Amino acid sequence: MNPAFNSWAEFFAMGGYAFYVWLAVAATLLSLLGLWAHTRWQHKQLLADIQRREAREKRIQQANHSQSDYVKSVARPQEKQQ
């Protein structure tokens, strides 16, 4: 089996096409890095959104519970008067 390149210098020169090859490699790696960063950002945003929704639902449930307790306490004195 013959190696494709005889030295590291030939490897990095890529047979005279080094600029295009390494530019393509850099563009690919930058794209993948950007995709990874965007995915992590979206994941954090999704978790924060879920926490906000759960907190909102909990506040709504507490408000409904407090409101029903208030209605019951107001209704009882009126029932006794009748």
Image (spheres, rainbow, N blue to C red):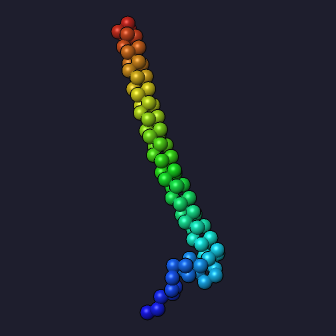
Report the side of 11 relative to 82 (left or right).
right
Residue 63 to residue 11: above or below: above
Residue drawn 56% across and 76% down? Answer: 12
Q: Quarter of the image holding residue 35?
A: bottom right
Q: Position of residue 38 (x, y in %)?
A: 54, 55
Residue drawn 52% across and 55% down? Answer: 37
Residue drawn 55% across and 79% down? Answer: 9
Residue placed farthest to the bottom in the image? 1
Task: Give the quadrant of the N terminus.
Answer: bottom left
Q: Position of residue 43 (x, y in %)?
A: 48, 51
Q: Quarter of the image holding residue 67?
A: top left
Q: Nearer the viewer, residue 41 or 71?
A: 41
Residue placed farthest to the top in the image? 81
Report how many numbered discs are placed on residues in the image: 0
Q: Position of residue 8 (x, y in %)?
A: 51, 79
Residue drawn 55% across and 66% down? Answer: 29
Report the side of 9 relative to 54 (left or right).
right
Q: Nearer the viewer, residue 36 or 70?
A: 36
Q: Quarter of the image holding residue 78?
A: top left
Q: Nearer the viewer, residue 39 or 58?
A: 39
Q: Nearer the viewer, residue 48 or 8?
A: 8
Residue 68 to residue 78: above or below: below
Task: Give the quadrant of the C terminus.
Answer: top left
Q: Position of residue 13 (x, y in %)?
A: 59, 79
Residue 8 to residue 70: above or below: below
